């Protein structure tokens, strides 16, 4: 099992202008430590013309109150030089198990 230390990105939807009806994610990043408990990679040949690289890694972080209160807002994890989309979260207090998917292409901090 490998150790993990890195950033986790949280998205909060906020209205861009009061009354505009246009909402955007504002990203906040926080640092966490934990373990990489599963390392897998895959290719999705049905996605587009180009094959999409995915990982099926699971990262277990030691969650603080912020993470426990906002786990539903987690968007990505910075790992191995890239941002990866969090596709699934299991709450196993005091830890959160974050399942990763494809490269994250959304808003950043």
Image: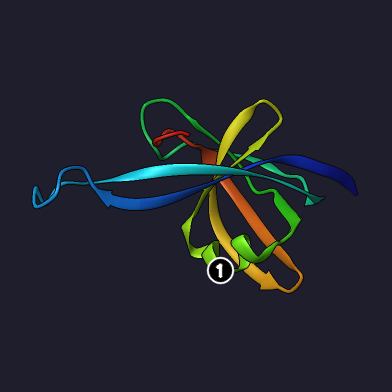
- How was the colour assigned to the protein in this rendering? rainbow
Total numbered labels: 1
Horizontal and vertical percent for residue 60?
75, 57
Q: Residue at x 21, y 43 (%)?
A: 16
Compared across the picture, whether 1 is left or right of 108 comes to right
Compared across the picture, whether 92 is left or right of 24 comes to right
Q: Residue at x 71, y 30 (%)?
A: 80
Front position in the image: 36 or 69: 69
Horizontal and vertical percent for residue 65?
65, 66
Residue sitting at the far front:
18
Against 84, residue 59 (above or below) is: below
Against 2, residue 103 (above or below) is: above
Front position in the image: 60 or 70: 70
Front position in the image: 83 or 7: 7
Task: Give the residue pinned by disc 1.
Answer: 69
Against 102, residue 33 (above or below) is: below
Front position in the image: 51 or 74: 74
Compared across the picture, whether 19 is left or right of 34 comes to left
Q: Residue at x 39, y 52 (%)?
A: 12
Instruction: Specify few, some or many for label 1: CA neighbours under 10 Å numbering under 14, 14-19, or 20 or more.
Output: few
Q: Residue at x 74, y 56 (%)?
A: 61
Horizontal and vertical percent for residue 93?
74, 74
Compared across the picture, whether 107 is left or right of 58 comes to left
Give the secondary structure at mark 1.
Answer: helix
Residue sitting at the far right:
1
């Amino acid at each position: 099992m490998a150790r993990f230390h890195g950033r986790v990105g949280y998205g909060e939807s906020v209205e861009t202008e009061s009354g505009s009806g246009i909402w955007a994610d504002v990203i906040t990043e926080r640092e966490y430590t934990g373990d990489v408990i599963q390392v897998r990679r895959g290719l999705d040949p049905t996605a587009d013309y180009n094959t999409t690289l995915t990982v099926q890694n699971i990262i277990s972080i030691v969650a603080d109150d912020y993470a426990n209160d906002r786990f539903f807002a987690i968007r990505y994890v910075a790992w191995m030089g890239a941002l990866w989309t969090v596709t699934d979260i299991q709450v196993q207090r005091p830890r959160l198990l974050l399942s990763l998917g494809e490269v994250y292409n959304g808003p950043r901090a």
